Image (cartoon, helix red, strand yellow):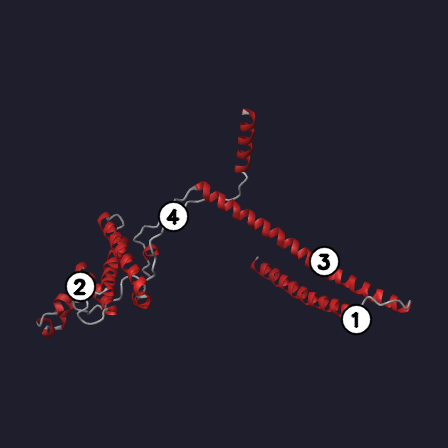
Amino acid sequence: MLRRVTSSVIQLRGIKHQVKFKWVRPEYVPAYKAEKSGDLEGLPPIPEMTIGQDYGLTNEVKDAPEAVNKIFSAAFLGRKEYNTLVTQELLNRVRRHQYDEDSAEARIAKLTGKIRCLQATMEQFPRNVQAKKTVQELIDRRKKLLKYMRTYDYKKFEWLLEKLNLEYKAHPESHHKLSRKESLRKLTEMHCDDIRNQKLTDYRNLLESQQGPFLREKLEALKFIRKEQEELQLAVTVTEQDIKKVEEQLKEWTIKDEIKQQAKKKKKNLISDLE
């Protein structure tokens, strides 16, 4: 029994080293990245001369000179005031009226503005743990609201995704942990399928290449049989329709073969030009 086990282990070790492909673990993508969050664009473009939201409400700014307005514009605003302009710009895309702040689409727009501002922060400071935690929580809240809207108002859901340039990525129903053993098994199956398909393709091409000579021999044999039966005054078993059918098949094969030969010549010419 021990000898059988050791021999099987030795055989498996030999097979393992003959695998021609190498498994590489997929790169980890954080949850705040656009690939997972579904944000198809970054921060919206804000004109440099846009006055901050809080400063724009004052009457003094309206009569102030251009130099003063430039100081309170988006080009010189702090991060907090600039993020407010970003959120307001996204909110204006989807709000129902001027004072809409609590509808589902308005809340999603405000969350999207905060998420994109935090994503920009994470790109600049990837080790900011607090920002990473906050943006992940906001993305989860937005997914819940999108799921609710998708269930109860699908047309508005699609309209909202188009306006905010979003892609809905729901939470996975189950978590599947990647493993090297399972991935290698799948790669092996794919490799075996490729070998099987390649052999079937080669065998199909071989049969198609032999089809032309076979049809010519068949056509000559049918004509010979019909001619002999007519000369010997026997019952004719080969009709003209049978001969015409074979001629049509031979004609179709000839056209296909010419097309294949032309494709092979073009491929060879391209390879020679690249070399």
Q: Earlier in the sequence, mark 3 or mark 1?
A: 3
The residue drawn where x is 55% and y is 39% is 18
Picture quadrant where residue 153 is located: bottom left
> How far is the residue under mark 3 from the one under mark 1?
24 Å
Is 158 on the left or on the right of 248, as rendered? left
Measuring from the top left, give residue 21's x and y in whole percent.
51, 44
Residue most toward the left?
60
Q: Earlier in the sequence, mark 3 or mark 4?
A: 4
Q: Does dot 3 land on a helix, a strand or a loop? A: helix
Please say if the residues under marks 1 and 2 sit with CB atoms less than 8 Å apart.
no
Q: Which residue is mark 2?
A: 76
Measuring from the top left, give residue 269's x and y in whole percent.
61, 62
Dot 2 crowding, Cα within 10 Å, few <14, some 14–19, many 20+: some
Please say if the residues under marks 3 and 4 sit with CB atoms less than 8 Å apart.
no
Q: Which residue is mark 4?
A: 27
Q: Earlier in the sequence, mark 1 or mark 4?
A: 4
Q: Nearer the viewer, residue 253 or 264?
A: 253
Measuring from the top left, give residue 64's x and y in whole percent.
10, 72
- Amino acid found under the numbered disc labelled 2: Phe
Q: Which residue is mark 3?
A: 210
Is 74 on the left or on the right of 19, as rendered? left
Number of the label disc, if any, that sits on residue 240: 1
Comparing marks 4 and 2, which lies closer to the viewer? 4
